[in-house]
Structure formats: C-alpha cells, structure tokens
Amino acid sequence: MIRSMTGFGEASVHIDGAHYFLEVRSLNNKYFKASIRLPDDLQGLEAPLEAILRRTLARGAITVTARCSDSSEAAAHEINHQALSRYIEQLGNVRQLQSGEATFDAGALLHLPGVLQAPTDNQEAHDRARHALSDLLGKALVDLIAMRKTEGEALAQDLMKHHDVIVDRMKIINERSPAVVEEYHQRLRSRVEKMLESAGAPVEPGDLIREVAIYAERSDIAEEVARLSGHMEQFKLLVAGDSDEPMGRTLEFLAQEMLREANTLSSKSSDADLSRCAVEIKGAIDRIKEQVQNAE
C-alpha cells in the first residue's frame, strides 16, 4: 500500500499533576530528516525519540514538538539561601538602603541569577517525562500513519490514472507500428517509380527492399515498447499492492527508467500518430515523476 509523506498526529496526557503534550508533523523530503523540539530540561530525550521515529518512518521531514507543564509539588524550585544571603549582604552596603531612602522587593530578589534553582534530584521527573513522551509519540504516530495511508490512497488513484493513459497509448503504438513500415514502403515505391518513369528506367526491387529494411531497422521500437511494458507492469504491482514497505524511492527510479524508454521511443517515431502517442506518454510519465516524490 502506497503511503504519502504528509501527515499529522498529536496526543496528550496528565500524570500526577503534570501535563504532557506532543505533536508530530511530516512533510515531503527526499530523505529522512527529524527535527525535535523539547523543553530545555528535557533535551536529553531527543535521541530516544528520534530512534522511535526512525523505526516507524522511512522518509519525510518530520517535526516533533513537545510541551510539558508541571503543577505538582515536585516542580517547585529551591531557594539557594547562600546566594540570597550574599545578595542581601551586598545590598546592605548600599548607602541609600542604610539611610532608609530606598527599599528592595523580596520578590525581585528571587529573579536574581542563582537564587532559584531547579530541584537537584529530578531523575524521577525526568524518567516520568521520558516514558510519557515516548508513549505520546507512539500514539501520535498512529494518527500520522493513518493520515499518510489515506492520502496515499488518493495518490495511488492518481498514479493509476496516468498508468492507464500510458498503457492505452502503447496499445495504439503496437497496433500502428506495423502499418508505418508498409506505408513507408508504398510511399517510397511511388516516389521512385515516378522518378524513374521520366528516365525510362525500371524499378529494381532489391534496391527498394534494402531501403525499406534500413528504414524498418532504424524505426524499430519493439524493444523499447517491450521494456516500457515491463516497467508498467511492475509499476502497477507496486502501486496496487498491499505491502507496507516504503516504495517511494523505487517508484522514483522506475519512473526515471520509464522516461528513458519513452524518450528513445519518441526519437524513433517518424509517424505523426506515433509521435503524438509518444508525447502523451512522456507527459504522463512526467506527472508520475512529480507525484511519486510525495510517496514514502
């Protein structure tokens, strides 16, 4: 089953007074690229969260954003009494304070560097956050993958539409190709007969056959049609299959090979109908190349 690279998922949970929220977004990218945004005190969780992403997703620019708010008692910062005492001691030396002409706000002292410190023993909170965010990422990825699959179904329908155009034009080419050589034979014979009739010389069948054979060999597209037909069969198996394996890069390579055969076929087409079909095939392949860049 083909999957798009575009998706979104989110999840949240309350645990012991702490609220954890996580969202994950995915956009198109040729390779896997993860950007994880965490609170400063949880930066150490970036590596394990990225490992979860890599196990689940193969391609795309993935952005994970996590937010945490803790209203429990354990979230309270501790006052560094030594630092606060030192600030008060220094303020006591200020003349304005000694004379009573100025005062200071005790609340403002708490914002001075080093006065408020995060709890030193926060391993328990860190472990709780790690488990919570890992679980939330797993839940958000379920929604993201579901969205990728839904968009992948629409993508597969569009790809098959272009596939059907190519197959239809190739059928016309197969039916038309034998007649092209015969029509060239008749046109060549008619022109030669007119030229030699005025000179009173007969037409040599051997020379005519040799010229037709050269033309037939130069314009033979059977090999290109066979290879392109094989590519189209494989393309259909990949797009319509039920495999969960990522196939975006395989489809990109296959589309490139399809275009290579179509270019050769177009260069050998000297008939107007064949040339028109070749141009329409190349147009459909170009649209396939654009669309498969959205596939994981």
Image (cartoon, rainbow, N blue to C red):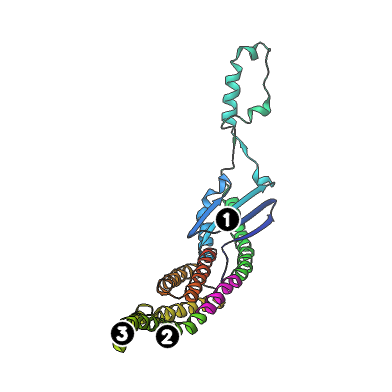
Label 1 belongs to which residue? 130
Amino acid at pointer 2: Glu
Identify which residue, 237 or 106, lies in the foreground.
Answer: 237
- Pinpoint residue 80: horizontal percent, then vertical percent: 59, 33
Magenta segment includes 167: yes
Disc 3 is placed on an element classified as: loop
Label 2 belongs to which residue? 182
Q: Dividing the image into 4 quarters, which one contains the N terminus?
A: bottom right
C-alpha gap between disc 3 and disc 1: 98 Å
- Pinpoint residue 33: horizontal percent, then vertical percent: 50, 56
- Pinpoint residue 165: horizontal percent, then vertical percent: 56, 75
Amino acid at pointer 1: Arg
Q: Quadrant of residue 242?
A: bottom right
- Pinpoint residue 101: horizontal percent, then vertical percent: 68, 12
User: Image point 68% across, 56% down: which residue?
Assistant: 13
Disc 1 is placed on an element classified as: helix
The reply to whether callout 2 and callout 1 are in contact (CB within 8 Å) is no
User: Image point 52% across, 77% down: which residue?
Assistant: 169
Identify which residue, 21 or 197, lies in the foreground.
Answer: 197
Question: Residue 200's mark?
Answer: 3
Magenta segment includes 41: no
Of badges 2 and 1, the one in the foreground is 2
User: Image point 40% across, 71% down: which residue?
Assistant: 267
C-alpha gap between disc 2 and disc 1: 75 Å
The residue range painted magenta reads: 156-170
Image check: 86 left or right of 73?
Answer: left
Asked whether residue 246 appears in the rendered view, the answer is no
**N-term mark: 2 or 3:** 2
* Disc 2 residue crowd, few under 14, some 14–19, many 20+, Cα 10 Å: few
Of badges 2 and 3, the one in the foreground is 3
